[in-house]
């Protein structure tokens, strides 16, 4: 399980050090892809395979699912962290997520999100009131 917000810096080569709490789970490899809200998403390989299988099955009968499947698979890179727990993010991924130097690495239960730190701070402040109210009907069975 991935939890918490961790601030890390990208180096000049586009390398990001993974939070120590996540390294053991990700040591064997990970799938890095474009996520929602201009963030990057990191999945364990087995979780990514399940997601890709569901997308492939749906794409056989639905045009939007085909678009999603193409987007998902074409923007995914398989990575293994180096001995220092770093991964190198492609320039395409860095551009998509607006990553410059300071990154927020977010644990989101079964996957990890990578945000530009300022974008994450802005996202949190914009959505804090909604989170505090918890008045979304889709949260009824959660809270």
Image: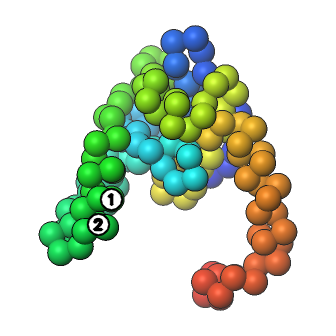
Name the residue rendered at 18%, 75% in the picture: 61
Name the residue rendered at 23%, 73% in the picture: 62
Q: Position of residue 48 (x, y in %)?
A: 32, 52
Q: Is residue 39 above or below residue 36?
A: above
Name the residue rendered at 28%, 47% in the picture: 73
Label for residue 65? Answer: 2
Kindly indicate whether the residue at mark 2 contacts the one at mark 1 (C-beta within 8 angstroms). yes
Where, by quadrant of the figure, is residue 18 drawn? top right
Q: Is residue 37 visible?
A: yes
Q: In the picture, which quadrant includes the C terminus?
A: bottom right
SS for callout 2? helix
Query: Gap in Å between the C-alphas at discs 1 and 2?
Result: 5 Å
Marker count (numbered): 2
Please state which of residues 55 and 62 is positioned toward the viewer in this rendering. 62
Q: Is residue 1 visible?
A: no
Q: Position of residue 72 (x, y in %)?
A: 33, 50
Outermost residue toward the left? Answer: 60
Outermost residue toward the top? Answer: 12
Q: Is residue 90 above or below residue 129?
A: above
Q: Residues within 10 Å of mark 2 (few under 14, many from 20)?
A: some
Q: Position of 2 compared to 61: left or right?
A: right
Q: Is residue 31 above or below residue 37?
A: above
Q: Position of 132 compared to 6: left or right?
A: right
Which residue corresponds to mark 1?
Answer: 68
């Amino acid at each position: 399980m991935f939890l918490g917000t961790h601030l890390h810096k990208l180096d000049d080569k586009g390398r990001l050090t993974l939070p120590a709490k996540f390294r053991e789970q990700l040591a064997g490899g990970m799938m890095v892809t474009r996520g929602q809200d201009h963030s990057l998403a990191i999945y364990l390989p087995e979780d990514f395979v399940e997601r890709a299988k569901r997308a492939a099955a749906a794409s056989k009968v639905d045009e939007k699912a085909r678009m999603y499947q193409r987007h998902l698979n074409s923007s995914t890179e398989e990575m293994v962290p180096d001995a220092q727990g770093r991964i190198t993010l492609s320039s395409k991924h860095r551009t998509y997520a607006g990553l410059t130097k300071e990154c927020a690495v977010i644990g989101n239960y079964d996957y990890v999100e990578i945000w530009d730190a300022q974008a994450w701070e802005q996202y949190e402040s914009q959505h804090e009131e909604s989170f505090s109210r918890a008045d979304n009907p889709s949260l009824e069975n959660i809270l």
